[in-house]
């Protein structure tokens, strides 16, 4: 059974910071992927809301990412570029 789980963040860019926010998200995505923490998908609705889906490889991968200096720098920068609307830290698949 996979240890993978999903985190979801809904956000919108701070006015005038959309390009910078997207660049930071791309950098975050690259670090998450390169370091084997997981994988990201980014979606956007018609009202400039973004939905970031992050599939963590495991709880251990998530814990390691939370201590990664590169990621911490990106998250700090992103804090000035976006407004978080909603976060789901851990979603688990429900079999149907």
Image (tube, grey):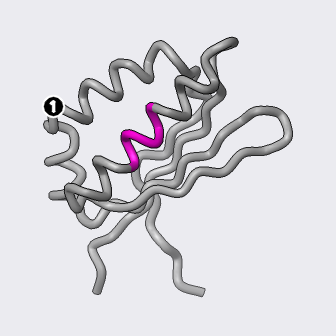
Total labels: the figure holds: 1
Height in image: 77 above or below 33? above
In this rendering, would 47 be left or right of 58?
right
At 38% from the left and 19% from the top, the residue drawn is 77
Q: Position of residue 49 (x, y in %)?
A: 72, 35
Q: Is residue 27 magenta?
A: yes
In this rendering, would 49 be left or right of 42?
right
Query: Image quadrant for the C terminus?
Result: bottom right
Q: Position of residue 62 (x, y in %)?
A: 24, 51
At 58% from the left and 21% from the top, the residue drawn is 83
Q: Quadrant of residue 57?
A: bottom left
Q: For label 1, count other residues whose C-alpha is less than 10 Å away and answer few (under 14), some (14-19) or many (20+).
A: few
At 46% from the left and 42% from the top, the residue drawn is 26
Q: Position of residue 91 (x, y in %)?
A: 46, 59
Query: Image quadrant for the N terminus?
Result: bottom left
Q: Main secondary structure of the magenta part?
A: helix
Q: Spot the residue most to the right.
A: 46
Q: Quadrant of residue 84?
A: top right
Height in image: 92 above or below 79? below
Q: Which residues are magenta?
A: 24-29
In this rendering, would 72 be left or right of 80?
left
Query: Label 1's element?
Result: helix
Height in image: 96 above or below 93? below
The foreground one among 94 and 59 is 59
Q: Which residue is mark 1?
A: 69
At 21% from the left and 39% from the top, the residue drawn is 66
Q: Quadrant of residue 19?
A: top right
The foreground one among 26 and 65 is 26
């Amino acid at each position: 059974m996979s240890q993978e789980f999903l985190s979801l963040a809904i956000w919108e860019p701070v006015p005038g910071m959309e390009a910078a926010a997207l660049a930071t998200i791309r950098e975050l995505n690259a670090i998450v992927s390169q370091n084997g923490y997981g994988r990201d998908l980014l979606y956007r609705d018609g009202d400039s809301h973004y939905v970031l889906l992050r599939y963590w490889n495991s709880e251990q991968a998530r814990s390691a990412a939370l201590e990664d200096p590169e990621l911490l720098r990106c998250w700090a920068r992103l804090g000035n570029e976006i407004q978080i609307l909603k976060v789901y830290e851990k979603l688990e698949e429900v079999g149907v």
